[in-house]
Each structure stands twice: as C-alpha cells, then as structure tokens.
Amino acid sequence: MAGVLQRFEQRLEGAVTGAFARAFRSAVQPVEIAAALQREVDNSAHILSRERMLVPNDFTVELSPPDFERLNPFSSTLSDELSTLVKEHVAEQRYTMAGALTISFKQTGELSTGRFRVRSRTTAAVTPVVGQRMGDTAVRTSNVVLEVNGMKHPLTAPGVVIGRGNEADLKIDDPGISRRHAQIKIHQSGAETTVTIVDLDSTNGVVLNGHRVATAVVGNGSEIRLGNTVIVIRTTEGA
C-alpha cells in the first residue's frame, strides 16, 4: 500500500504547478483522499470465490464547499491520478472490478472544511440488447423497460436472456452473474402484458424484492438482484 501511495505522490508532484499547487494547500490533501480510496476498496471487497474478490468501481469523493471550490478546477487531473492509484492497488491485491473505474467529486454542506467522505458502489458495464431500439421514444412507447445502472432498456416479447456471457441478449459484466443467468419472459395477450423472471440454473440465484425465486411474475417497480446488480422493472399502467 505504501508503494502505491508513494508513486501517487511522485506523479502528483510532477503535475502540481502554480495555481494547482496553491489549490493543494487546502485543508484536504490529495494523499489523504488517495489513502481513503484504498481503504474503501479494501473494506468493500467481498468474496466471489476462493481466488476472486469483487471491489467497487464507482467512487464519489464528497468535499466541504471550500475544499470543493479549491480542488474542483483541477478535478480532471486529480481524478486521473487517483484512478491510476486505485488501478495499481487493485492489480497488486488481485481484486476484480465489475466495470470501468470512475472517480468524481461532489460538494456537500454537511461537511466542514478539512473533512471529506468517500462513497462507493459496484456498477457493472451493460451491453444493450442487439437490434433493440433505444432512446427516449423507444422507452416511452415500450410496455416493459428494464433499468440497469442508470440505463433504460425497452423490451418486447418474447423477452431477453440476461447473463455475463456473449450468448446473453442483455450482457452485464458482473462477476457475480452467470453466463446465462436469468430470462425475462414477456407475454402479450390483447392489452395485457405479463412479465416473468426465470432463473436459468444460475450459480448465485435470482432475488426478487428480497426473496430468492426460481420463477415468478414481476410487476411495475419490482427489483431483481442478479449477482451484485439490481434491475428495476417498469411496466405501463395495466400491464
């Protein structure tokens, strides 16, 4: 851990000049944020298997308004250096990330000058359904929409297979998801639309609204957890 932090400081020293250097005299120091990110990675790691541990890949650093004002103009450079540090730490510890690494900064009035907070979450990369119409119009006109990691995926009958493998219709790069994990079936009968979730003999199962299921009918607002990813079902009225 010390080696990663030392390399981070050396890289940052090379980048810090003029106004950048003055900004870093703020109460919150970049090396403190770097150390906190490492701790967050380690503390949030959880076991996938004997040889694999999953860690978050989406981080938000919350700062007090004065600290945010000083550091925000240089947030891109700082984020790049912090990302390099986190990637080095992940590689050294042989951790697994579910998707691309992102680090952002946010101000909050809850914190006083010199105080900061790191929040993290695991956000898997999602590949849309091949050939599926996307965009606001497709979402508005679809009877069934899946919300995954901030993205909306309109669906049509007969539905989709969700998994981590290339053979899945909706691919989610979550290490906790099987190659063919679950199927969402859509049955249209006149004006009525029925949506069903089916576990395809996955390793970690399907959790619907907090309960593990093999197969079940889902309604508007239902939450389905596959691995470390939560999928929300949105259906039109009367569906």
Image: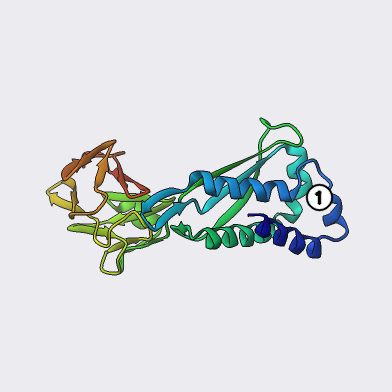
Mark 1 closeness class: few <14, some 14–19, many ≥20 residues within 10 Å: some
Is residue 70 visible to us here?
yes
Which residue is at the front of the view, 55 or 61?
A: 55
Residue 145 lies, with reference to residue 3, above or below; the image says above
Give the colour scheme shown.
Answer: rainbow
Residue located at (70% from left, 59% from top): 8
Q: Indicate the position of residue 222 as horizontal and vertical percent values.
A: 29, 39
Q: x and y percent of residue 89 in the render?
A: 58, 58
Is 57 positioned to the left or the right of 156 in the image?
right
Residue 88 lies in what quarter of the image? bottom right
Q: Position of residue 107 (x, y in %)?
A: 67, 40
Q: Which residue is mark 1?
A: 24
Q: Toward which corner of the image does residue 77 lie, by quadrant? A: bottom right
Establish if 154 lies above or below 165. above
Q: In the rendered image, which quarter is residue 17 located in?
A: bottom right
Rendered residue at 23%/57% (across/down): 156
Residue 78 percent location from the top left of the image = 70, 56
Examine the rendering and report whether any part of residue 218 can be seen. no
Q: Quadrant of the N terminus?
A: bottom right
Residue type, mark 1 in image: Phe
